[in-house]
Image: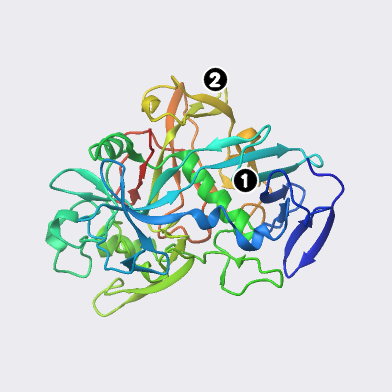
Amino acid sequence: MVNTAKITYTSTVRRLVLPGSNVNQAQAWYGIQIDEANSSPDLTRIASDMTLHASLPIHNNIKACLLLDNGTVNYYLDPADWTKKADGTASKLDGTDGQVMMEWPDFYYKVENNFPAAGQHQIKISATSGSGWTLVPKHYISAFEAGIQRSTNKLASVVNTSADYRGGDNTSAWDASANSLLGKPATNINRTNFRTCARNRGTGWNINSYTHHKWLLWFFAIEFATLNSQKAVNTALTVDGYKQGGLGEGVTTVNGTTWNTFNSYNPFVNCGASNSLASGSGEVNITITDFGGSGVNVDVKVPRFRGHENPFGHVWKILDGINLKVQSVASGGLTETWISDDPATWNDANYTGYTNVGNQARDCGYIKTALMGSGAEFVPAVTSGADQTHYYCDYYYTTIPAAGVSLRTLISGGRASNEVDAGLTYSRTDREPSYASTALGSRLAFIPA
């Protein structure tokens, strides 16, 4: 528990200094405090020892690797140069040596709601267990938006521009053109079929889950002390040695009509476009040739967070392990949030094996407060009174059925033309699991037994 604390200010980011923070603790932890009464997206840093926000020990245990289909790590990558293995020899990211994945270590979390005051929430992470702490087991998330190997119908995380890894809706007529889908992530597949393609790789393989995306979001927020993932990139550290800024606009700024003309809303950024950042965070500027017509090029910035390319933007990403029960007014008037961390229960027809963690907002709008609860749920509770520069800074889109109840999916991140609406907490709950779109993709995941 946190006792008396003093809040001090450094730059534009607040930090909470705990009494005795330089004294050895039984359990080392660090995290953030969200104050619902404060409209700024910037957060208060909290910790058992504030130097943990500079050293980021759990964050720094996220490692890039090549993962074989049997779940074995073939080898780890040099965190500063993915053309090399960790031992300095040459790597292969084209699928020959396995899938390019980010290995997340075991960690524990604790959420304290309405603490230390009403409307305040503390999210803490630790490498060790303690009373009231919950384990998030080791798992793997694809470094790239998921591609697909057409010859095997297996979801993939590779850098490969051969016809076998043609992305998007698999239009082969564009292979020699500027709008080629070679090397792009796969889209135009519904959640049911994305799940099947992931599991075609073997036991433990799935598409990315709501829970794992949730922790990617909170790890970003803890590291950068902001809820605004589209905040401008700032590579300088604060005077305390903390990260600041965000991941930039991302691939969210193109004109939708122009995009449709270019390639019918298919993806246009190659997997691995930001690999120069390796296991780091930031953005890489790339040029899309002839995007606006012959000779009219467009520059976009590809974001990366600790090796995870395009964690938002470019194409929407569908999530598994979450089913939304959206009721018409006459059928209850609620949007219930049902989640499961057990892939054996994941389905597109019911809520069996899922847990209802609360009711989401019913209106479209920018997210003001999140559902939170003991699991730190990021889906919106309130969407009125916020905008693109305050509170969560991301948009929530939903529809309410005219009659009956609709089982919906959660689509995250925003797409290439969503601009300021996009971000790590951007959410759509207007589509059923059967929905497919050339602008809808996924990520690959591996969950060890």
Q: Is residue 422 visible?
A: no
| Placement of 358 over or under 115, stated as above or below | above
**Where does the image place residue 447, in percent across and percent down from the top left?**
39, 38
Residue at the extreme right of the image, as rendered = 4
In the image, residue 315 sits, relative to residue 278, either above or below, namely above
Q: Callout 2, which amino acid?
A: Ala
Q: For the residue labelled by badge 2, is the local secondary structure a helix, a strand or a loop?
A: loop
Q: Position of residue 188 (x, y in %)?
A: 27, 46
Q: Could you say which disc has been placed on residue 442 in the image?
A: none
User: Would you say 180 lies left or right of 433 here?
Assistant: left
Residue type marked 1: Ser
User: Coloring scheme of the render?
Assistant: rainbow
> Count of labels shown?
2
**Residue 139 visible somewhere in the drawing:** yes
Between 377 and 235, the residue placed more toward the observer is: 235
Checking the image for residue 330, the label placed there is 2
- Left or right: residue 150 versus residue 111 is left
Residue 445, by quadrant, is: top left
Q: Position of residue 357 (x, y in %)?
A: 58, 28
The quarter of the image holding the N terminus is top right
Q: Quadrant of residue 203?
A: top left
The residue tagged 1 is: 126
Q: Who's the residue at 76% across and 38% down the image?
A: 114
**In front: 286, or 121?**
121
Residue 371 image point, x, y percent:
62, 37
Mark 1 packing: few (<14 Cα in 10 Å), some, or many (20+)?
A: many
Residue drawn where x is 71% and y is 73% of the image: 239
Taking 94 as reference, is 271 left or right?
right
Q: Quadrant of the C terminus?
A: top left
Tell me if 95 is positioned left or right of 378 in this view.
Answer: left
Residue 393 picture quarter: bottom right
Query: Which of the two labelled residues, at mark 1 and mark 2, occupies the earlier sequence position?
Result: 1
